[in-house]
Amino acid sequence: MSASENAAATENGAAQMTGAQIVLQALADQGVDHIFGYPGGAVLPIYDALFQQDQVKHVLVRHEQGAVHAAEGYARSTGKVGVVLVTSGPGATNAVTGLTDALMDSIPVVCITGQVPTHLIGNDAFQECDTVGITRPCTKHNYLVKDVEQLAEVLHEAFYVARSGRPGPVVVDIPKDIQFMTGTYKGVSNSQHKSYVPPRDGNPDAVEAAVELMMNAKRPIFYTGGGVINAGPAASERLRELVRMTGYPITSTLMGLGSYPASDKQWLGMLGMHGTFEANNAMHDCDVMICIGARFDDRITGRLDAFSPGSTKIHVDIDPSSINKNVRVDIPIVGDCDAVLGQMLDAWKAKTPALDKEAHARWWDQIETWRARKCLHYKNCDDVIMPQYAIQRLFELTRGKDTYITTEVGQHQMWAAQYFHFDDPNRWMTSGGLGTMGYGIPAAVGVQMAHPDSLVIDIAGEASVLMTMQEISTAVQYDLPVKIFILNNEYMGMVRQWQELLHGGRYSHSYSEALPDFVKLAEAYHAVGIRAEKPAELDDAIREMINTPKPVIFDCCVDKHANCFPMIPSGEAHNNMLMGDDVTGEDIENAITEEGKVMV
Amino acid sequence: MAQPGSAYSLEKPIENLESHTMSVLVDNEPGVLARVIGLFAGRGYNIESLTVSETEHEAHLSRITIVTTGTPMVIEQIKHQLERLVPIHSVTDLTVHGQPIERELALVKVAGAGEKRVEALRLAEAFRAQVIDASLEHFVFELTGRQSKIEQFVALMQPLGLVEVCRTGVAAIARGAERM
């Protein structure tokens, strides 16, 4: 039976079909058009059902970790739930890194895993593992389906849980005999979940108090995060309206880039460990902090007891456990960012604010003096490509194009966040919480699948990119013209930077020895390889990359010793940053205290 | 309250630890207890005592009673982290609603002869423990009460020939007419 025939049967009431067909029908009814997966013994019935329908398109990855990252890229660039299909045992364990990544960054993913037949569970069968046990701490929720009559309901619930509230990954483990068994398909139900009902609107009194506080602020700042992006494009629109209406400065976490346009004058740049001087100092000296959809992560706060000591803090978050976890806040508002921003706008408009214009002018003057420090300035060079310069050129040459950026993890990721500027949400896909090297290529594959005509670039490092390089093969197979822009400094740059700062320059195993020739590697994969070694040839090479309608690996050979600045050394406060242009050897040696050295 | 010096705080803050009793209503489904215990283990929270049983058969709901210790900030976190779990219906911190009624059941095996045996039986009566098994050489006492009472009884039995003890952990319910 094809999926469409099944759909007809559903309308007539309960349809009987096999477990495998139920899976495909549920995916179709959930509006899924692409899934990322890898077949194996315990999912063969589902792959057989996939073969016999054409509603859901399957993308064959080269490793299950890649499947989850691709689904994440797909989900983050579209706002939809990303879907993964893998087999039991190694299929499931290989997916664990991706699932943990999705959990840390709150990305909606449904991962269907095959399992050995129910009568073999617990017998150490071939390719058996305790999938629900292993994935329990790295998913928002998971299910083992032991009754085919519950399969449809569980699948629909999995989608509901993945996308509702604070989104996250959900695993549905389906034993092979259940996939063969015939059962009843039930369509999507609108009834309320029996226990999981996430909040939406914020407490009106708290919103009122927050707006009151905002109106009386003398040195206010907005600090926003990935929650605004997760709440949908409408939330970003409301954020823009609110920020412009108030005239207050705004900074954002790595995950929140794009929710407020980087080209706007109220934008201070990213904050945190590699954030801008102006954003971090403004956070430190503000009197009212308006945190929306961010979670006071340790990369943001730096030294906790010196974090924004004089401010009154408002925190909007859909997850009550994010509130008062690291930093005690004064006005907590539990709710969806979009809804609460709407409430804040209404409350602001309902009043005639008597803002302290004079204080705000002084505050902006102060911010301008910090800005004048030009913290992202670096010494450019005529014969070696500086990595910062490479990102700047990439940004300039892709301006005005329909561009999506993914990254790997490390120095290149921070440089991308600092020098590539985003004016729209859902354009920036990076592994923030887990910091997964190898995220970028598969994520780019997922993004390109969702946006076939857009320019999708993975800003990468030569070490990270080798972790999931095999997914180039996926890109080639599906004609996905992703661009892998490698800042090749022959080092695991961030590891090297920390070894320089903390470990007396003893570069233990951080040099990328025996690197492949990336141009030849691209050719071996039937992709296109381009190399740039001199600043003078960079622009033409980037243009060639953009104009190549095929997957490209771009080997950008950059300065080997550049460090990522500015930087808040671990264990330090926001107003104690290391700057790039005036760091001496002695500064570097003394930057991190003995206490700070044990921190990550 | 004071916050630790950094996110990766070096010294464990030993400020005002509080003991709280939480009542957690969950779907009685496979793995739900593992979720709760895994949450405590994974995030480094303490479990002093844990009691679980299905309490509403029709609705397949179980009630988990957890006694835990932590700073007020950690106690608040525990409650919110538990609430994130999908099969959890409600989490009530009984301690913040006034002193809850707490009871624990213990089975205490004591072996001995002569004066010690007589003393054990005498103390058992004073504590209103029941003899539920006996031979000429031993008693098994059943004792219900607050944790402190059980601790005290077990300590008294120690020199009188205590063999082993089994305890259920705390069951707790809020005072007053309302449901939690």
Image: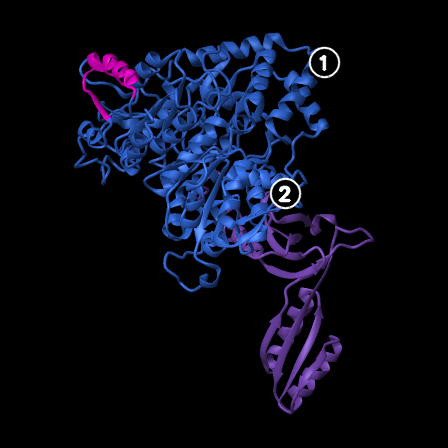
Instruction: Note whether A577 is above or below A594 in the view shown.
Output: above
Horizontally, residue A532 falls left or right of residue A88, namely left
Along the viewing direction, whichever of B127 and A300 lies nearer the viewer: A300
Mark in the foreground, 2 or 1? 2
* N-terminal label among 2 and 1: 2
Chain letter for the purple part: B
Give percent across and percent down for residue A202.
67, 29
The coloring applied to the image is by chain
Q: Quadrant of residue A372?
A: top left
Q: Which of A3 and A177 is in front in this view?
A: A3
Residue range (magenta)? A528-549
Identify which residue is drawn at 55% across, 41% down. A6
SS class, disc 2? loop
Q: Which residue is drawn at 38% across and 48% down?
A: A91
Q: Chain A is drawn in which colour?
A: blue
Residue B124 as seen in the image, left or right of residue A395: right
Disc 2 marks a residue whose amino acid type is Tyr
- For the question of whether residue B78 can be seen, the reply is no
- Number of on-image labels: 2
Image mark for residue A351:
1
Horizontal and vertical percent position of residue A581? 30, 18
Chain ID for label 2?
A
Q: Where residue A537 appears, x then y in whole percent?
A: 20, 13
**What type is the residue that disc 1 sits on?**
Lys
Q: Position of residue A145 (x, y in %)?
A: 53, 53
Q: Nearer the viewer, residue B78 or B159?
A: B78
Q: Element type at marker 1?
A: loop
Which residue carries the number 2 mark?
A196
Q: Can residue A4 be seen in this view?
A: yes
Q: Is residue A513 magenta?
A: no
In the orientation shown, which residue stands out farthest toward the right? B177
Taking A577 as reference, is A174 above or below it?
Answer: below
